[in-house]
Amino acid sequence: MFDIKDDYLAAGDALTQLLAPLVASQQLKKVYQANELSDVDERSQITPAAHVLYMGDVMPDTAQGGNTSQIKQTWLVVLACRLSIHERQAGEQLVSLLNAVVGKSVKVGDQLLGPFVRVNSPINPRFTKSHGYYPMAVTVQLRFKPS
């Protein structure tokens, strides 16, 4: 299990790293890390793109030993597509995105962060006149011990 030492949100960087090959192969044009999906302005949206969003964490209901806490963080990876251009390709892009992330781990320093496990998304897909946003949720287990 990954021990949080310096960055509580290290899983966001790990997800971005897992998605990097999709940018290199031009399946995605960009991977964004944003605090909220509403921060993205559709007029300047580069598509297809993935947005990595932290959705919070939960701790088990059972008592934890000492100061160490086990945490399950939930992250969204939202595929953004321009509907007029990419509508028929969204399904294929979702498969590529899931294959890049689900079940994968990333080496961070001398530790492995992961695996990322797919769970039900806390939000539904959203569509505007020009864009579709397809959220995929994943969780990852972490451990935190205050110094």
Image (spheres, grey):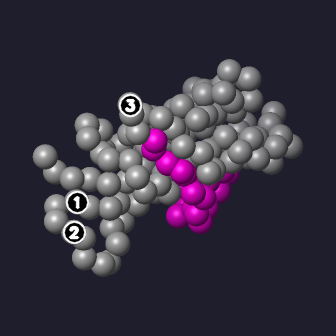
Disc 2 element: loop
- First along the sequence among labels 1 and 3: 1
Label 1 crowd (10 A; few <14 / some 14-19 / many >=20)? few
Q: Which residues are magenta?
A: 112-138
Query: Counting other residues with Cα less than 10 Å from the Cα at mark 3, is it few (<14), some (14-19), or many (20 or more)?
Result: few
Q: Quadrant of residue 131?
A: top right
Picture coordinates of residue 68, whole percent (x, y): 22, 60
**In the image, what residue occupies the spot 61% across and 34% down?**
19
Dot placed on the residue nearer the N-terminal end, 3 or 2: 2
Amino acid residing under circle 2: Gly
Residue bearing mark 1? 68
Q: CA distance from mark 3 to mark 2?
A: 26 Å
Residues at marks 1 and 2, CA–CA distance in whole angstroms? 6 Å
Dot 1 amino acid type: Thr
Callout 2 crowding tier (Cα within 10 Å): few <14, some 14–19, many ≥20: few
> In the image, residue 40 lies at what x, y percent?
51, 36
Residue drawn at the location 21% of the way across and 53% of the way down: 145
Q: Residue furthest right?
A: 88
Horizontal side of 103 relative to 9 (left or right) equals right
> Disc 1 to disc 3, how far (Cα)?
20 Å
Q: Residue at x 43, y 57 (%)?
A: 141
Expressed as whole percent of the image width and height from the top left, the position of residue 66 reads 16, 65
Residue on which disc 2 sits: 65
The residue that appears at 71% across and 45% down in the rendered structure is: 99
Describe the element under mark 3 as helix, strand or loop.
Answer: loop
**What kind of residue is marked 3?**
Gly
Q: Quadrant of residue 13?
A: top left
